[in-house]
Amino acid sequence: MNEPYSPTAPRPMSSTSPSTMKMFMCFLTVFIVAQTIGTVLFCLYLHMKMDKMEEALSLNEDYVFLRKVQKCQTAEGQKSTLLDCDKILRGFQDLQCKDGGASKERPKFEMQKGHEHSHSKGKNETAVAAERRQPIAAHLAGAKSSKAVSVLEWRTTGYAPMNSLISYQDGKLKVEKAGLYYIYSQVSFCTNAKASAPFTLYIYLYLPMEDDRLLLKGLDTHSTSRAVCDFQSIREGGVFELREGDMVFVNVTDSTLVNYSPGSTYFGIFKL
Ligand SMILES: *[C@@H]1O[C@H](CO)[C@@H](O)[C@H](O)[C@H]1NC(C)=O
Ligand SMILES: *[C@@H]1O[C@H](CO)[C@@H](O)[C@H](O)[C@H]1NC(C)=O
């Protein structure tokens, strides 16, 4: 009785042990897989969260920077020794320069900044603002007149500038803004041996109450033995301090000799 039992007795022992082992192994595998998936998901979540945090942090930095710029714009902010306004404003300007498409508000903003912030960097910023503004300049071509005139007449050309701060009337260019101006003119003309007096080109400052003031003068005594006319040009230019409303004009000794072919006779001015 003992004999047949004894071989069966260890059998259940040995058969239950592998199945338990199998179950345990299964459970362990599932557990490990679940753990791995869980860890990966958690890492992903953490990563996303970190990204968001970083973004928020950089936004906060931007905000602080903008607040500093805003403070530096005010007089009290500039007095504050805690803020390095020079550095902050320079940084802000660099950013604006990098951003090529400047909006219309920016030059205004910079001009304002240039006024308030008039020490050390002030000049630099106003210069930048001036560059962005429309340059004050005019360039005119000679306009032929049938009779001899004491003031040469001019006309605008398609390609050349004519700023609203410079007006033209009766041969004179009038500046609406005081400052340093470069004034230039070229007149081409035709002389021959018969011409007695030298041909002279003058640029005058028009003064209604007193004698007009001579600014520039150029003469040409050159003449050939040929009877036919000999084309020549006189060109002159210089920098002058003009007041608001000042007018300048050009005249020559004999306006009937002036040549008006394109590009040969012109008169212009621009603000430095
Ligand atoms: C103006 O600023 C630029 C850079 O911001 C600098 O290189 C230049 O020297 C400055 N010019 C003057 C006149 O301060
Ligand atoms: C040129 O203008 C000046 C100043 O008005 C005047 O004195 C001079 O006579 C003019 N010259 C000629 C040739 O008209």
Image (cartoon, grey):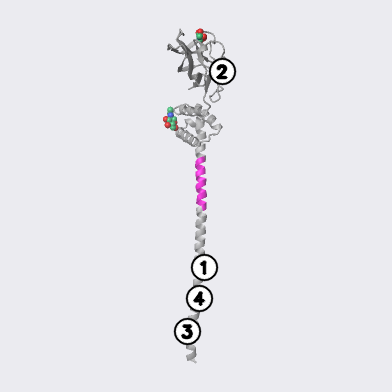
Marks 4/3: CA–CA distance = 16 Å
Above-or-below relation of 126 to 55: above
Marks 4/2: CA–CA distance = 108 Å
Above-or-below relation of 46 to 177: below
Asked whether residue 156 is drawn in magenta, I would say: no
The three-letter amino acid code for the residue at tag 3 is Pro
Residue displayed at 48% across by 81% down? 14
Image x and y of residue 12, in percent: 50, 82
Q: Which mark is residue 168?
A: 2
Residue displayed at 50% across by 74% down? 22
Image x and y of residue 33, in percent: 50, 65
Can you tell me whether the CB of the residue at mark 1 lies under 8 Å from the nearest atom of ligand 1? no
Residue designated by label 4: 20
Image x and y of residue 261, in percent: 52, 19
Q: Magenta residues?
A: 48-62
Above-or-below relation of 86 to 227: below
Marks 2/3: CA–CA distance = 123 Å
Marks 3/1: CA–CA distance = 30 Å
Marks 1/2: CA–CA distance = 92 Å
Dominant secondary structure of the magenta stretch? helix
Marks 4/1: CA–CA distance = 15 Å
Lower position in the chain sequence, tag 3 or tag 1: 3
